Image: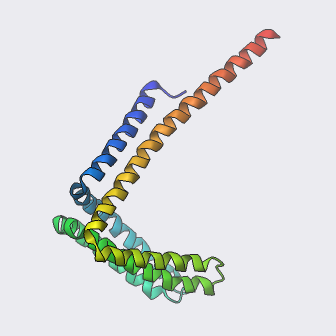
Amino acid sequence: MIKTSTKILLAVAGILLIVLGIVCIANPAATLFSTAWMIGCLTLVSGIAELIFTFKTQAFLPNSGTRMLSSILQILLGIIFLGHNLFVTISLPIIFASWILIEGIIVAVQSFDYKQLGFSAWWSVLLLGIAGAVLGFLGLKNPDVAGAALSWIIGLGIISAGVAYLLALFGINRVENHLKQFRTNVKNAIDEQ
């Protein structure tokens, strides 16, 4: 059985995440400002990991040059995000729209590598790449809308995590109730014998 204090902490964490998600949606500027630093760290690590992946797979992926370009751009973006937080906050929607546009094009180009390797769903990768490129282009045309959308996505993601915590709590309680009932049934069966 899980301690009551643990359940209370899970409930509090879920509620706080839901509140934080609502704050993110209600205050897009603060959300973008705090997100800029966190994304800088993640982007830098992602770029380094992708660069390592590129070096290890370039022998059998002929278009690995595009993947290398992507990894170098991610590393540069990570460094920019970490070094110029206010500037990044203002330009975050444009940066992300550009990144999504470039990534979409790269994914679309790489889908043909997957086709050559016999991956039967290569066309779905192509469609996702095209969709990413289109969304990136639309974000560049409307950076204010892209910034608000980014804040909404972050807020909804955090709210989803909070709801998941609360659902986990309800699930834990349900399992514990079933275990109590099972124990009672076993004890009654033993007592009847």
Residue drawn where x is 38% and y is 50% of the image: 158
Measured as percent of width and height from the top left, residue 76 is found at 29, 76
Judge whether 114 appears above or below 39 on screen: below
> In terms of depth relative to the viewer, which is nearer, 146 or 67?
146
Q: Is residue 93 among what the camera can see?
A: yes
Measured as percent of width and height from the top left, residue 102 is found at 38, 80
Q: Quadrant of residue 33?
A: bottom left
Measured as percent of width and height from the top left, residue 126 is found at 53, 80
> Which residue reaches farthest bottom?
62
Q: Is residue 51 among what the camera can see?
A: no
Judge whether 106 appears above or below 17 on screen: below
Quadrant occupied by the N terminus: top right
Judge whether 47 appears above or below 9 on screen: below
* Count of residue discs: 0
Using residue 39 as the reference point, say whether residue 6 is left or right of it: right
Measured as percent of width and height from the top left, residue 67 is found at 44, 82
Residue drawn where x is 23% and y is 72% of the image: 80
> In terms of depth relative to the viewer, which is nearer, 77 or 129?
129
> Which residue reaches farthest right?
193
> In terms of depth relative to the viewer, which is nearer, 136 or 175?
136
> In terms of depth relative to the viewer, which is nearer, 14 or 190?
14
Using residue 50 as the reference point, say whether residue 92 is left or right of it: left
Q: Quadrant of residue 165?
A: top left
Quadrant occupied by the C terminus: top right
Q: Quadrant of residue 77?
A: bottom left
Residue drawn where x is 64% and y is 26% of the image: 179
